[in-house]
Amino acid sequence: MKYELETIPVWDAVREETECPFCLLEEQSRSRYLDFYLGSSVMNPETRQRVNRSGFCPSHYADLVARRKAHGLGLMTHTYLMERQKELFPLMETLQKKSRAAGSKKVMPLVPGDIKKAQEELISSIEDQETSCLICDDISRSMKRYYYTLAYLWRRDEDFQKALGESKGLCLHHMAGLLPLASEALKPSELARFLDELMNLQKKNLERMEGELHWFTQKFDSQNNDKPWGDSVNAHKRTVQKLTGRLFNLD
Ligand SMILES: [Zn+2]
Ligand SMILES: [Zn+2]
């Protein structure tokens, strides 16, 4: 599959002094899509239909609320809520009907498992809604383009290879995301060298991280009060980023 290349944002992110350029790119994407769904796109019928079909996951709903665009969010969730009612009300009414029938001794024969089945259908409708999310889908598509672009730039540009090799590497979450796209972007011989260099870069930086975190913990010993922090400032937050792909405010 061919992906649209995103060379400028990927180059910019690799130049940043960060534990993972993809963490920055993912955060930029998240912010861009939150603005998109709360902006003028909310009036676009095609976007409304997409929202009505998929909605957002709890985490991205929380992000949308935090953006404080009350009117846009109100409009979007209003039509979405009406769509949800169309699906939920019949399921809720079926559950009522089945449980009423089971509760009444007059209505026989009772089919065992009827209530359970109606409950399960209602539960899965709710669970499906919580796992389907337009913003998750949009970010995932963007990330695939970024992963592909990194492998492409590594193949085409020696300066990029050097910059990546001198960087702090990637977080584990995004390393896992990169591997399948690197396999698509590179020929087997290129892939072998890419993986060799990437694994060395990752091992070196995970060891660095461990050393920084160790000194971070030692700094809480009163004997070390006057000694400098060195590179260990925020090592706890950067380690969590390295492990999870979540970006934190390092102030
Ligand atoms: Zn990352
Ligand atoms: Zn989401």
Image (tube, rainbow, N blue to C red):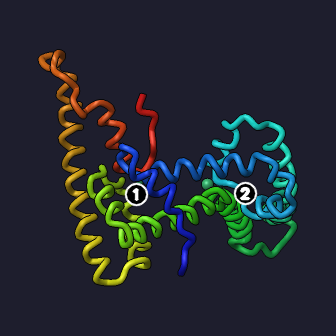
Whole-angstrom CA distance, mark 2 to mark 1, is 25 Å
Q: Depth check: 104 or 230 in front? A: 230
Give coordinates of residue 20: x percent, y percent: 38, 51
What's under tag 1, amino acid-wise?
Answer: His
Residue at (32% x, 57% y) in the render: 164
Residue topped by disc 2: 55
Give coordinates of residue 84: x percent, y percent: 81, 58
185 left or right of 139 in image = left
62 left or right of 19 in image = right
In the image, residue 199 above or below residue 76: below
Residue at (24% x, 34% y) in the render: 231
Q: Which mark, residue 54?
A: none
How many discs mark residues in the rendered view? 2
Q: Depth check: 89 or 7 in front? A: 7
Q: Secondary structure at mark 1?
A: helix
In the displayed orientation, state which residue is furthest to the bottom.
188
Residue topped by disc 1: 173
Q: Depth check: 238 or 95 in front? A: 238
Q: Could you tell me if residue 13 is visible in this image?
A: yes
Q: Is mark 1 within 8 Å of ligand 1?
A: yes
Give coordinates of residue 121: x percent, y percent: 71, 67
Residue at (53% x, 68% y) in the render: 5
What's under tag 2, amino acid-wise?
Answer: Gly
Quadrant that contains the C terminus: top left
130 left or right of 53 in image = left
Regarding ligand 2, which quadrant of the image does it lie in?
bottom right
Residue 22: name its quadrant.
bottom left
Q: Depth check: 175 or 218 in front? A: 175
- Sequence-earlier tag: 2 or 1: 2
Q: Secondary structure at mark 2?
A: loop
Badge 2: residue crowd in 10 Å (few <14, some 14–19, many ≥20): many
Q: Could you tell me if residue 104 is visible in this image?
A: no
